[in-house]
Amino acid sequence: MNSLWMWLIAAGIMVLLLLLWLVRGSIGRHRDNWSDLRQVDVAAFRNLLVAEDNEFLRNSLTSHHYRQVRRARARAMQEYLMWIAENCALLGSLLRSSVLPGDPSSTRQVSALVLRALHVRLASLGLWMLLWLEYAAPDADMRPMRVLKRYEDFMRSAEGYLTVSMPRPILDSGRGRAG
């Protein structure tokens, strides 16, 4: 039993390192390109988080089909969480490059926004990993609602700051708006 825990911990660490390597690799390619922001459909993501839907699915589908649907929904949530993590990394880079030299107010504001981006990114990546539990055991119930709310708040703040300091839209208006 002890060796099983060691293997599980080692596998978890390897998954975390792989995830960080993948996300870090994508950052280098997108360093200052505004168009590389993922358009996170917040309404669709929220729809995946509705608890009543799970109850409806459980009562409407066979056990096999219910597990299939829950796994598909978990993978969709993971995709959204990965996009949120990538957006936070990209916006952190854009924010750091927007600091006005010699302006301590700008430096403080950017530092606070970058810290918020880091918190949302880490929470997203952590939940991404936890959703594998839901994928493996569809009755487990992971709800990343708090991360979604924190992401929306961060996006509004970052968009406001970057729009003022770099008069260039960071988000497309219309379908699939990220914030």
Image (spheres, rainbow, N blue to C red):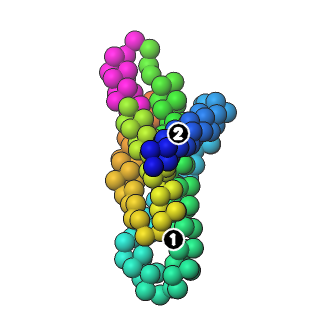
Look at the picture and state if 57 lies above or below 39: below
Within 10 angstroms of label 1, few (less than 14), some, or many (20 or more) residues? Answer: many
Q: Which mark is residue 10?
A: 2
Label 1, secondary structure: give it: helix
**Residue 171 in sight in this render:** no
Q: Is residue 106 magenta?
A: yes
Q: Which residue occupies the foreground of this view, 108 or 45?
A: 45
Q: Which residue occupies the foreground of this view, 166 or 143?
A: 143
Q: Which residue occupies the foreground of this view, 5 or 96?
A: 5
Which secondary structure is most common in the magenta stretch?
A: helix
Q: Which mark is residue 31?
A: none
- Whichever of callouts 2 and 1 sits on the residue coming sooner in the sequence is 2
Q: Which mark is residue 70?
A: 1
Point out the residue furthest to the front here. 1
**Residue 137 in sight in this render:** yes
Tag 2: amino acid: Ala
Within 10 angstroms of label 2, few (less than 14), some, or many (20 or more) residues? Answer: few
**Residue 11 percent across, percent down from the top left:** 55, 43
Q: In the image, which residues are magenta?
A: 102-114
- The answer to which quarter of the image holds residue 79 is bottom right
User: Residue drawn at (38%, 50%), measured in percent from left and top?
Assistant: 147
Tag 1: amino acid: Arg
What separation in Å lies between label 2 and label 1 (alpha carbons)? 27 Å
